[in-house]
Image: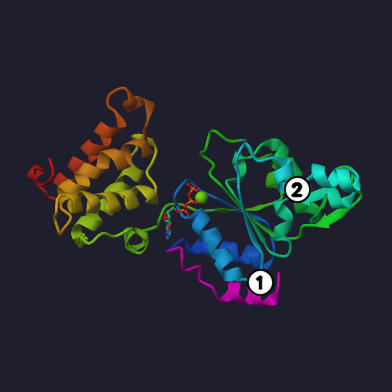
Amino acid sequence: MDNQFKQSLINSSFDDILGQDAVKKQLKSALVMQRNIILVGPPGIGKTTLAKNVAKISGNHTPFVRIQGSPDLTAEDLIGDIDPIKAMEFGPSSREAFTKGKIFKANKGVLFFDELNRCSEKLQNALLQVLEEKKATIGSYDVDLDADFIFIGTMNPEDTSTEKLSDVMLDRFDLVYAGYPETTEIETAIIHNKGKKLDVNYPENLLQLTVNYVRQLRDSDKLEKIPSVRATLGLYEQAQSNAFLEGKQEVELKHIFLAVKSVISHRIRLKPSVKYLKTPSEFALEKFSQFCEHLGYGKQGYG
Ligand SMILES: Nc1ncnc2c1ncn2[C@@H]1O[C@H](COP(=O)(O)OP(=O)(O)OP(=O)(O)O)[C@@H](O)[C@H]1O
Ligand SMILES: [Mg+2]
């Protein structure tokens, strides 16, 4: 890592992410030491945004390579493969016939591996040697190619459709745990900064209500899957559309109510004890009504 990058890291406050101070601090200290890290946390809390912020800081002369983890990603994609045409020309085990995989583009820079735990175990194993030795040996080739980079991975521990990272793999990383925005104020600021806007006013009290409604769902003991920041952003944006399509200049409570079903229902999962009594939509709408009544809004405001 060049000194300029190190200096920018020290000075940076990772402005694209609001709050998450402890996470930023751990990320920074791992980066200056060139330690490999994995950002761990539920979906939609800014892991990718944070890693991209590192790219921004690293500037133009430090390579930043992003790999999207998926079960289809192969070791060949990562490390490299034989190019059949060049193999005919130069011979199958010639160095020329080898096409370098994506990992080498990150040499002397940052390799950002999003959703690492969605990759096959085979691919994880292919990564191990590279992480350990900073070099990759290519099958029958007697060459070691430099692959010296800082590794930033992300993973969502609740994703059940994924491979478990093996212990040997995990032992090579520092894990940095991130969670939902710490306070209502921070989440409101995220919405202000990141939410798309139409030419309609979103009254501050209704924005508070929107944010707090989602935050209250996160605290519910009836849910086993809870809504992320994307849900809050979704309500904020959809409520504006609903107002706009009605020709209104200001978002009203009913516009938020109308957004709840399509924004929230699939982002929550009810615990088995409640699952047979109501659907996620019914649950979300009922919680919304209760929340509004609790705040003193009459049902005529939205029903
Ligand atoms: N603390 C935060 N500060 C700023 N924006 C945030 C924060 N948390 C979430 N967001 C916003 O929420 C959205 C989702 O963030 P992002 O894609 O980075 O999440 P993620 O953790 O990578 O999610 P996934 O696990 O689903 O990939 C983005 O619009 C992002 O800007
Ligand atoms: Mg992500």
Q: For ligand 1, tell me if the residue under mark 1 lies within 8 Å.
A: no
Horizontal arrangement in the rendering, residue 245 relative to residue 98 (left or right) = left
The alpha-carbon separation of the residues under discs 1 and 2 comes to: 22 Å
Residue 287 x, y percent position in the rendering: 23, 39
The amino acid on which the numbered mark 1 sits, given as a three-letter code, is His
| Residue visible at 47% across and 61% down in the picture | 20
Horizontal arrangement in the rendering, residue 297 relative to residue 127 (left or right) = left
The quarter holding residue 119 reads top right
Residue 280 x, y percent position in the rendering: 31, 32
The amino acid on which the numbered mark 2 sits, given as a three-letter code, is Ile
User: Is residue 20 in the magenta section?
Assistant: no
- Is residue 273 shown above or below 214? above
Residue closest to the far top: 276
Task: Read off the residue under disc 2.
Answer: 79
Q: Nearer the viewer, residue 53 or 97?
A: 97
Q: Where are the magenta residues, as a range?
A: 1-18
Asked whether the viewer can see residue 65, the reply is yes
- Is residue 31 shown above or below 74? below
Asked whether the viewer can see residue 268, the reply is no
- Is residue 127 shown above or below 121? below
